[in-house]
Amino acid sequence: MIKSEEILQNLELLSFPRLAGTKYERKAFAILKNKIMEHASHYFNQEFTFTTFYSKYLPKILFTLLFLLLISFFIENTVFFGINVFFILLFSIFLLNPVKMGIGKKIKSQNVYIKYQKNNHNDSIGPIDIGNNNSMNILFISHMDSKGQRFSIKMRIFSYKVWFISFIFGLIFVFLDDILVFNLYLHLFEFIALGINLLELILIILNTTNNKSSGALDNASGVTCVLELLKHYSKYENRLNNYNLWFLFTGAEEIGTMGIRHFYNKIMDFNKKKTIIINFDSIGKKATYFVSKFNQKRKKQDYHKYLKIAEKINLELGYSSSTFGVRSDGLYLKGFWIWGP
């Protein structure tokens, strides 16, 4: 049975600042492992290393280079333009595989996972074993680390949005200025777009990471929910007949979703049409789902079934199609693994 009291107790136990790669994240994992051992005979560790270059510095470098690209258009300097394009392409290469990025100090983190075999198997717990392509799996995922930042999440998302809009308008005004006869108002619009873009760039650069937050959004609530599900399914009679159950706790989610990137290499051969991912990430005043394969316009039957379930348990449900500025283990998997229905 799922007990809200135990979820709250675990939440209070794990709710402290735990920046990825620090002793505080290691402390959180130590507490987690002790809690796991109350319900499972053993767990599996996946240790990995990462650097902070991808999450902390690469975005600031690329945003700066793109601003300089606008400047090169504005001053019509071909050499300056070519240099900027070269460095933009050079640093963009790092976006292809952040896991193998070796720039900066190597920091250690880990993933912890438990697997319960489907009920028609004799063994209840086993390591990574995809079996054949017909295996059906459900993965419950949450991340252990937290991250504080100088500016609030609303301010950060607002800065990125304004930067993006001003960059697009800057390109449009510069392009029009090149093909049209000199226009004072057009020049003024260019200056305004460049000025706004520079201001937002400064805010993006000034934002820094710290270990002062016990969880900006999630506050370890995802971990405690997955722990409670682990306790429930630890009883053999609660297992599912057709699905293997996975309980995954990732590290370094706040630092470039590094944990799930490493774990993905272990599950990339799963049958995508027979695998369900449930990512527990944030808390709020109401439940919200977004970028789903079913909504008001797509798979209406499933959507209305979802609404009925929410109504039955007295759950206020919201829908959002926008994820601008949002990053999570779940969205990483959505982007790099196209799930089946």
Image (tube, grey):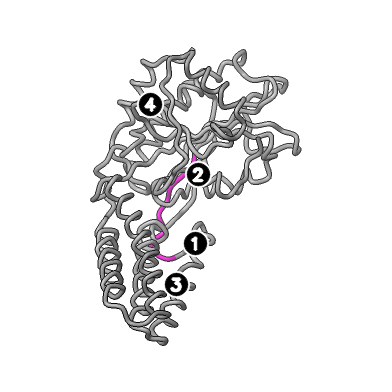
Residue under pointer 2: 331
Q: Taking 188 as reference, is 70 left or right?
A: right
Pointer 2: residues within 10 angstroms few (<14), some, or many (20+)?
Answer: some
Q: Amino acid at mark 3?
A: Ile
Q: Amino acid at mark 4?
A: Lys
Kindly indicate the quadrant of the structure image that contains residue 220. top left
Q: Are marks 1 and 3 in contact (CB under 8 Å)?
A: no
Where is residue 159? Give x, y as percent: 30, 54
Q: Residue at x 60, y 49 (%)?
A: 265
Q: CA distance from mark 2 to mark 4?
A: 20 Å
Q: Secondary structure at mark 4?
A: loop
Q: CA distance from mark 1 to mark 3?
A: 11 Å
Residue under pointer 1: 95
Q: Amino acid at mark 2?
A: Leu
Kindly indicate the quadrant of the structure image that contains residue 320. top left
Q: Secondary structure at mark 1?
A: helix
Where is residue 306? Give x, y as percent: 54, 23
Q: Is residue 7 above or below residue 256?
A: above
Q: How many marks?
A: 4
The stretch of residues the image draws in magenta is 103-111
Mark in front: 1 vs 3: 3
Q: Are marks 4 and 3 in contact (CB under 8 Å)?
A: no
Residue 88 is marked as 3
Residue 286 is marked as 4
Q: Residue at x 31, y 78 (%)?
A: 183
Q: CA distance from mark 4 to mark 3?
A: 41 Å
